Structure formats: structure tokens, C-alpha cells
Image (spheres, helix red, strand yellow):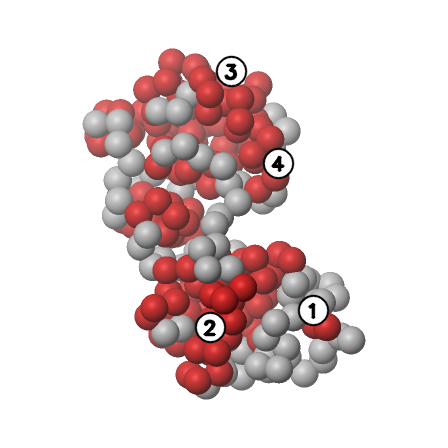
Amino acid sequence: MAHQLPYHTIREVFVRFQAAEPEPKGELEHVNAYTLLVAVALSAQATDVGVNRATRALFEVADTPQKMLELGEERLIEHIRTIGLYRNKAKNVMKLSRILVEDYGGEVPSSRAALQSLPGVGRKTANVVLNMWWGHPAQAVDTHIFRVGNRTGICPGRDVDAVERAIEDHVPAEYQRHAHHWLILHGRYTCVARKPKCAACLIRDLCAHEDKTE
């Protein structure tokens, strides 16, 4: 775990991230808050590319909780069977769709507690939905952010909750809304797990990682 970078260094990191990608976007395809929620729930232990491939046809026929209930679990499974843990995920999607219809008038709630009360929705999923749909500065820490945060010193922490707090505590407020997207994209394409692409890294000179690759 690298040491926590000082404020002025973290600020420069995000100045560069913003200059390179002013409006970073999540890569999960969706058309409304409900389809975003379903896509994020399906993405656990799966790639965004794989989820998008499975949900394109699904969301054409089921883009609301009511339509998903009418589709039914077996036909939902037909759409998502290429995604890992698809049976369990299908059960959760049907359960959360029923709760949304019965308790929330078919709308996706915009509070973290309400979202986390839904089957198959953890803190990370709730944070993605809050951030991507409502623009809330919530930090959804995945394996990419955990790795980048600890390797670079931008937001080190022993677990995902500690890294989430480190982002909230140390990243300047004006960069909070997009922070997790910048960090995910950096981890997905540059600061990769096995051999980080340090030579191509736009924050190489700011990073606390000692064992940089050429």
C-alpha cells in the first residue's frame, strides 16, 4: 500500500484526468434508472461488455419493473444466461422489480438506504446508480479503484470501505462527482493489474508506486 499523497498532488492528478476526459461515462448501457439498476446488479463478477451484450435485447422488451414482471423469470434467464451467476441474479431482478412496483410506484428510489434494501443491491451498486443517474458524488469502489487507490497513493485503504472514505476525504470536492469513473477507467486501461502501463500513464510523475514499469 502506497502512502497517502498530499492534497496538492491529488488535485493535480484530477486536473489531468479531467483535461484528458472531461465527462467520463460508465460503460454499462441503460435507458433509464431502472435499466441502470438492473445492469449494475447483473455486472457483479461479470464484464460490462458481457452485460451489455445480454441486456440490449432484454431492455427492448423489459425497461420497467412492471414489464420485467410480465416477462417472467424463465424468459429473463434466456436473455442473461451468458452472465455469471445468472440464476441467482434473475431471482433478485424479479424480486426487486416486484418491490419497486408494490412499494415505490414502479420508480427507482434515490436514497442509498432504500436502494440497498433491494435484493441483490449492495453499497457499490447503490453508489453507481446514485452517481450515474442522479449525479450524486457517490464513490463505487470496485477492484480497479481499490488497486489504483492503493498502488498510486491517491486513496489507499485496507478494504473497499476505507478506499471509499479516502476518496471522499482527500479528493477535492469539484472532482468528486466523476472521481470513481476516472479511477475505474485508469485502472481498466492504464494502471492494469499485472503489468501497469507506466510509460503511457499521464500521472506517472505524481504516483507513489515505487516499482514502475518502463
Residue designated by label 2: 15
The span from disc 4 to disc 2 (Cα, nearest Å) is: 32 Å
Q: What element carries label 2?
A: helix
**Residue hosting label 3:** 75
Left or right side of 14 for 78 = right
Which circle, 1 or 3, is nearer the viewer? 1
How many angstroms separate mark 4 from mark 3 (CA)? 18 Å
Quick check: 43 left or right of 114? right
Residue 40 location, x and y as percent?
Answer: 46, 41
What amino acid is at disc 2? Val
Q: Name the residue under label 1.
A: 200
One can see residue 135 in this view: yes
Q: Which of marks 4 and 3 is nearer the N terminus?
A: 4
Residue at figure coordinates x 23%, y 25% from the top left? 102
14 on left or right of 176: right
Counting every numbered tag in the picture gives 4
